[in-house]
Amino acid sequence: MPSESHLSARRVYREIANRFASYLHTGGTLTSKEHLGDFWNTTHRDWIEWLTENYLPHGSGFDSGTQFDFEHSRLEKLVFITAFHHMDKDGYYNGWTYHNVTVTPSLVSSFYVAVSSINRNDIKEYIGDTFHESLSQHINVQRHKERLDADAQAKEALTPGG
């Protein structure tokens, strides 16, 4: 029988996908934010944003971090928004490229990563590899659940009528 710690460990992409499915199921819509006042919907959204902020690329060229695209993501497609800050051969920053990173399921390798936009300095392969590595990380869901649940309850307590 698997240990309790094994049961609470998941890969980042799977946790985000499960939370997004729950977000949609509890009232989140693809085109409207009218249900975001709902406790569970807000909790799932907060989880996704927290996982994105803490596990997906930020720094080292991804100087604006990464955001989850709630509007363009679907049950079978997760979309992230990022930008890469390029440097010249002398080590000076010399411009940005902006990218959508789309994650889709694969029967062979868990998931595929596709990177949109121009391929300045062959950056798309690097971005794809970096996202694949970040999304493949194992996380202990239970460890983070306690922190996020406490944050959500505190937020609920501060909300008028909460």
Image (spheres, rainbow, N blue to C red):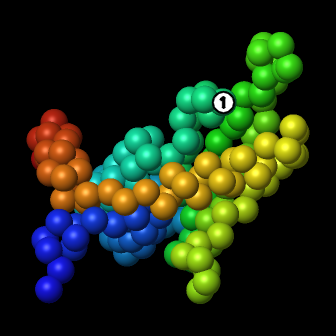
Between 32 and 141, the one nearer to me in the picture:
141
Is residue 119 shown left or right of residue 162?
Answer: right
Is residue 81 shown left or right of residue 70?
Answer: right
Residue 87, x across and y down, in percent: 79, 22
**Callout 1 amino acid:** Gly
Residue at horizontal 16%, vertical 36%? 158
Q: How many marks overall?
A: 1
Q: Point out the image quarter for the N terminus.
A: bottom left
Q: Quadrant of residue 50?
A: top left
Between 136 and 78, the one nearer to me in the picture:
136
Residue 118, x across and y down, in percent: 87, 46
Residue at horizontal 22%, vertical 70%? 6
Between 64 and 162, the one nearer to me in the picture:
64
Residue at horizontal 43%, vertical 57%? 137
Q: Quadrant of residue 105?
A: bottom right
Is residue 100 shown left or right of residue 73?
Answer: right
The relative height of residue 142 versus residue 87 in the rendered view (above or below) is below
The relative height of residue 58 versus residue 88 in the rendered view (above or below) is below
**Crowding near pointer 1: few (<14 within 10 Å), some, many (20+)?**
some
Residue 112, x across and y down, in percent: 65, 70
Which element type, helix, strand or loop, lies under badge 1?
loop
The relative height of residue 85 versus residue 41 in the rendered view (above or below) is above
Is residue 125 shown left or right of residue 133?
Answer: right
Residue 161 visible here:
no
| Residue designated by label 1 | 61
Residue 129, x across and y down, in percent: 66, 54
Residue at horizontal 66%, vertical 30%? 61
